[in-house]
Amino acid sequence: MLMFLPCLLYYIFFKYLPMFGIIISFKNYNLFRGIWESEWVGFHYYRMFFSNPDFLLLMKNTFLLGFYNLVFGFPAPIILAILFNELRSMVFKRFVQTVSYLPHFISNVIVAGMVVMFLSPTGGWVNEMLGLFGIGPINFMVEAEMFRSVFVGSEIWQHTGWASIIYLAALTGIDPSLYEAAEIDGASRMRKIWHVTLPGIRTAVIILLILNIGKIIEIGFEKVFLLYNPATYSTADILSTYTYRVGITQGNFSYASAIDLFTGIISLIFLLSANYLSRRFSDSSLW
């Protein structure tokens, strides 16, 4: 319980207590008048957001970026954990694990700088490699249609190794006698993975999938903000970056709070729906 206490305090002070601030989304908040003295405006800012010409574009960009990140990013740590589990050399296994974990501890600012440097049309190693095949330099960072691929690729590289730890822990709970029985029955390595390994980590996979579906439109602000530019707004501008611009840059705190609350409600709906479907069609769910 003492080890859990810091986590509990974090959620109390940074998640639950700030919920009081939701009230400003229903007020014309004035910094000098305070929350209680500001004028009530009801759902004015919600109607303002829904009638915004950029509403559908923002929703599309946010959902697609989260969806692609889920489709391509979620299976990656599962595959990596299974590959680690199949390695026989412990020295090589530990080395590769350490290398794969390291990007997770690099700041998003550094990662974004590395991405820009690697993809630079002048000297970036990606374009240098493409040049070997006769492909001219491509300015990836100003090509709107490439932004999602760049973002998802950087997310996979940065977090796959760290995310595989949970699946590696789940793999240790599989009874070794199951592998021995499968080997006696003549099962190949792929058969053992399919019939023993994957069923053994199924519960962990389902629970983490539910949590990731709940976060599908809560794409991290930092990396998108660091990678996008006006040339890629058509595919890169998402709810969190738009909230930053209207809330922090323009000082419209009520409008930004309304957008943020809307995002939280959509995430809750996704989470409840995913949990319901999981409970309906499998024996694993959050509750």
Image (spheres, grey):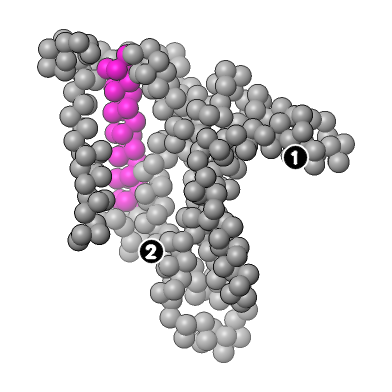
Q: In which quarter of the image is residue 22?
A: top left
Mark 2, mark 1: which one is toward the viewer? Answer: 1
- Kindly state the secondary structure of the residue where label 2 is placed: helix
Q: Which amino acid does label 2 sit on?
A: Thr
Residue at image location 57% in from the left, 85% down from the top: 183
The answer to whether residue 28 is left or right of residue 159 is left
Query: Gap in Å between the C-alphas at discs 2 and 1?
Result: 41 Å
Q: Please identify the quadrant where the N terminus is shown.
A: bottom left
The answer to whether residue 244 is left or right of residue 161 is left
**Mark 2 vs mark 1: which is more N-terminal?**
1
Write down the residue under mark 1.
125
- Kindly state the secondary structure of the residue where label 1 is placed: helix
Residue at image location 61% in from the left, 72% down from the top: 91
Is the residue 260 above or below the residue 169 in the image? above
Is the residue 200 above or below the residue 152 in the image? below
Write down the residue under mark 2.
203
Q: Does the magenta stretch include residue 269?
A: yes
Q: Please identify the quadrant where the C terminus is shown.
A: bottom left
Q: In which quarter of the image is residue 256?
A: top left
Q: Position of residue 177 (x, y in %)?
A: 47, 86
Q: Can residue 16 be seen in this view?
A: yes
Q: Where is residue 277 in the image (x, y as percent from the top left)?
A: 34, 51
Residue at image location 29% in from the left, 23% down from the top: 257
Q: Where is residue 36 in the image (x, y as percent from the top left)?
A: 12, 17
Mark number for residue 71? Answer: none
Tell me which segment is drawn in magenta: 252-277
